[in-house]
Image: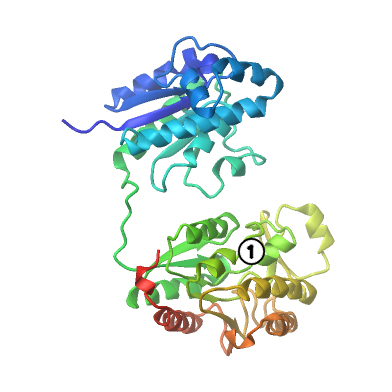
Amino acid sequence: MAKQNGIVIICNLDTRGEDIIFVKHLIEGRGHKAYFLDFSMEEAPPFPGDITCEQVAMRGGMTIQDVRECYRSDRDKAMQNQIKGASLIVADMLKEGKVQGVFGVGGGTSSLVGTSVMKILPFGMPKLMASPMASHPAYVDKYVGTHDITMHHTVLDVVKMNPLLKAQITNAVGAICGMVEMTLGTDIQFDKPCVAVSSFGFAEMAVQAALGMLEEAGFTPIVCHAQGKGDKAMEDMIRSGAFHGVLDFCTGGIIENLFKGNRDPGPDRLNAAAEAGIPVVLAPCGLDILSYGGRPDMLEKTKDRPQYVQDSLRVQVRTSAAELCQAADVIAERLNRAKGPWTFLIPLKGWSSQDQLGRIIYDPAADAAFVARLKDRLVDPTHVKEVDLHLYTPEFARVAVDEFVRLYKGVPQALAAA
């Protein structure tokens, strides 16, 4: 007999129970074991969960009576208690091998509780939240962050079952069941050292060439899309020990954070690799532009600058020498603290597919101001190497990979890292 997979259904049965009991039946109909984890805070549910709201409350440190009383005066405190209790219970189930997937269903509160629990689970474990909040721009980043959580947009609120809502939730249940049935699991093995490679479209030619070169050199390249979330995730994964080194072509997140561009990865960029002591080769792709697409206020503010319009959502504004000098200060401060070997490669003929002679973004004077400031602020400016190439070329990729290999070979016991 095939092993039963366990799927935890995180929900508040007091307001959703009678409407979503069919979720458990659908999962069990696929041959899986379904567990209702009830985090109800407001009222007694119409039926008990497999993990009851009383159990969840107690693991969080409060009685269910205290949670219900607190819910009326301090809703966040009650919710944080239920998140804590549910997380501890699911962590225990994970250790016991009882859970192979987690499914959340409900509105705003359910989305926050469900995804908070999902964040404690390992990379690769199926996690899906079905909610009308799944596409809300103000909240979805809080729900997902840099975790591998799938959001299913139900469009309709999960209140009072109807044919349209049932169709959406059934699709979501099918998705979590399919994920659990086909997952490769969380014990992901690599037979070669892993190298994070930051990438986005303006560096694509160099990145694509570098991937093959890294493989030929005996590494497994892992591409992180430097659109704000991908490079933030890269920082998190470096801290978790996932990578043996970084080929950081696209460091533009630094300037996006300083001047609030659309690709802002937050204030932590470059810190993880510096702290980890792993070898890093950096390049300046993305520092030459700020992404202000869909931002009429910022586009108006920068209207006198060269702009590259990809489409209505992606408009790249050329960075100024003054902005680049501020970015150089931040980069130097972080690299000066690096515990491992690093090199910053400067391609003298341009930093991206648009930063080249004849293109509107081309500004070698601004680029040169960055390089001068970076060298001035570094404790050891010999880490900066200028190459007479354009970044958007296989030739630059060759230089970057060769430099990475050189640094990597100089790190003692590098293969034992991570």
Q: Can residue 154 be seen in this view?
A: no
Quadrant of residue 382 in the image? bottom right
Most distant residue in the top direction: 46
Q: Where is residue 291 in the image (x, y as percent from the top left)?
A: 69, 61
The structure residue drawn at horizontal position 56% and vertical position 47%, both measured from the top left corner, is 145
Name the residue nearer the viewer: 397 or 16. Answer: 16
User: Which part of the image, by quadrant, shows the N terminus?
Assistant: top left
The structure residue drawn at horizontal position 46% and vertical position 21%, both measured from the top left corner, is 55
Q: Answer above or below: position of 149 versus 289.
A: above
Q: Position of residue 245 (x, y in %)?
A: 45, 70
Q: Answer above or below: position of 316 versus 348.
A: above
Name the residue nearer the viewer: 312 or 35. Answer: 35
Name the amino acid, label 1: Gly
Most distant residue in the left direction: 1
Q: Where is residue 70 in the image (x, y as percent from the top left)?
A: 65, 20
Horizontal arrangement in the rendering, residue 66 relative to residue 298 (left or right): left
Q: Where is residue 375 in the image (x, y as percent from the top left)?
A: 68, 84
Residue under label 1? 253
Q: Residues within 10 Å of mark 1 (few under 14, many from 20)?
A: many
Horizontal arrangement in the rendering, residue 308 relative to residue 387 (left or right): right
